[in-house]
Image (cartoon, rainbow, N blue to C red):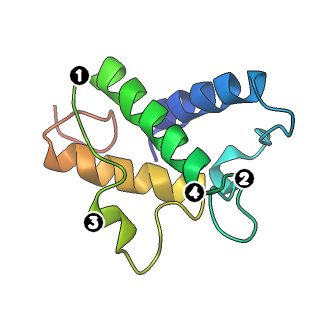
Amino acid sequence: MSDRLLELIGNVVADINERRDEKIPTDDLLHVSLYGDSGVFDSMHLVNFLTLVEEAIEDEYDVEISLTSEKAVSRRISPFSRVGRLIEFIEEEMALAGAETGHGSAA
């Protein structure tokens, strides 16, 4: 799993937590549920969060990916169920876009 992507998402969460009364827990970020019954976001806030993550990825890696595509939404196991699954989905999308994630690729 990409530590850089986890750090990037952690930074987005930290920014959100500065403006939010009910803080998103960050001590075990990989297992934080993003959406659903135990999720930290409703649908509107999830879309805003994903937009911020997309912007951070574009800034960090100079690649554009869509985290709200039909591909993401139609998966049997949602990439929005927890942060770890979101990172896996991001890595897949970045690999398809030809981006270097700093994880398991040949130099």
Q: Secondary structure at mark 2?
A: loop
Disc number placed over residue 40 in the picture, else none = 2
| Cα gap from disc 2 to disc 1, whole angstroms | 28 Å
Q: What residue did someone put label 4 on?
A: 43
| Cα gap from disc 1 to disc 3, whole angstroms | 21 Å
Q: What residue did someone put label 3 on?
A: 71
Q: Do the residues bearing badges 1 and 3 touch, measured as CB atoms within 8 Å?
A: no
Q: Secondary structure at mark 1?
A: loop
Eyeballing the image, is 66 above or below 52? Answer: below
Give 85 or 67, whichever is nearer the viewer: 67
Give 10 or 73, whichever is nearer the viewer: 73
Farthest right residue in view: 21
| Image quadrant in which the C terminus is located | top left
Q: What residue did someone put label 1 on?
A: 62
| Disc on the earlier residue, 4 or 3 | 4
The quarter of the displayed image where residue 88 is located: bottom left
Residue drawn at point x = 46 percent, y = 30 percent: 4
| Cα gap from disc 4 to disc 2, whole angstroms | 10 Å
Residue 24 shown left or right of residue 93 in the figure: right
Category of crowding for the residue at label 4, using alpha-carbon neighbours closer than 10 angstroms: few (below 14), some (14–19), many (at least 20): few
| Disc on the earlier residue, 2 or 3 | 2
Q: Do the residues bearing badges 4 and 2 touch, measured as CB atoms within 8 Å?
A: no
Residue 67: image x %, image y %? 36, 49
Residue kind at label 3, given as amino acid type: Lys
Residue 93 shown left or right of residue 107 in the figure: right
Residue 101: image x %, image y %? 31, 35
Q: Do the residues bearing badges 4 and 3 touch, measured as CB atoms within 8 Å?
A: no
Which mark's residue is nearer the viewer, 4 or 2?
A: 4
| Disc on the earlier residue, 4 or 1 | 4
Residue drawn at point x = 46 percent, y = 48 percent: 1
Residue drawn at point x = 80 percent, y = 42 percent: 25
| Cα gap from disc 2 to disc 3, whole angstroms | 22 Å
